[in-house]
Amino acid sequence: MSNPEMTLTKTRLREGVWEGLLCCEGEDAPKLTVTHLEVALENVTVEAAGEGKWQLCVPVPATALSDGVQTFLIQDEATGETLDSFAISAGSPLSEDLRCEVALLRAELDMLKRAFRRHCVETEA
């Protein structure tokens, strides 16, 4: 995402495999870690796809799929920097989960706005 030396672009999600194209300098394959719920996924591959380009393939394990939104983080192993992420949503309760999350976010935002306004009034005096 923010590393100018590495850019990762999703190319597709097909047959349970997330694929992306990584552009970076250097001749050695970059070492990446893909995690779900802070657990590293296995069978992630990085293969040469031309000069300065690498094909990243992330097989999404069936055990990671369940109701709700599942988020996967792709990180540079050397720096720990998050290069990208992807999410997979599934299940019928999803729409209710999202509505509840939005309602919770709105309530928290309202609380922050009140606290900020109160802070502004108190610091003016």
Image (cartoon, rainbow, N blue to C red):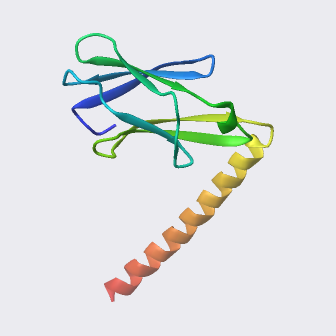
Residue placed most toward the observer, 51 or 44: 44
Q: Is residue 33 left or right of residue 70?
A: left
Quadrant where the image shows the C terminus? bottom left
The residue positioned farthest toward the front in the image shown: 43
Q: Position of residue 70 (x, y in %)?
A: 62, 41
Q: Position of residue 29 (x, y in %)?
A: 29, 24
The residue positioned farthest toward the right in the image shown: 92
Quadrant where the image shows the N terminus? top left
- Give me the residue at 53% from left, 36% from top: 41
Residue placed most toward the observer, 2 or 64: 64
- Give me the residue at 23% from left, 12% from top: 51
Q: How many marks?
A: 0
Q: Is residue 95 above or below residue 103?
A: above
The residue positioned farthest toward the bottom in the image shown: 125
The residue positioned farthest toward the top in the image shown: 50
Q: Position of residue 121 (x, y in %)?
A: 40, 82
- Give me the residue at 21% from left, 32% from top: 5
Residue placed most toward the observer, 97 or 35: 35
Q: Is residue 9 above or below residue 70?
A: above
- Give me the residue at 32% from left, 84% from top: 124
Q: Is residue 8 above or below residue 34?
A: above
Q: Quadrant of residue 31?
A: top left
Q: Is residue 15 left or right of residue 51?
A: right
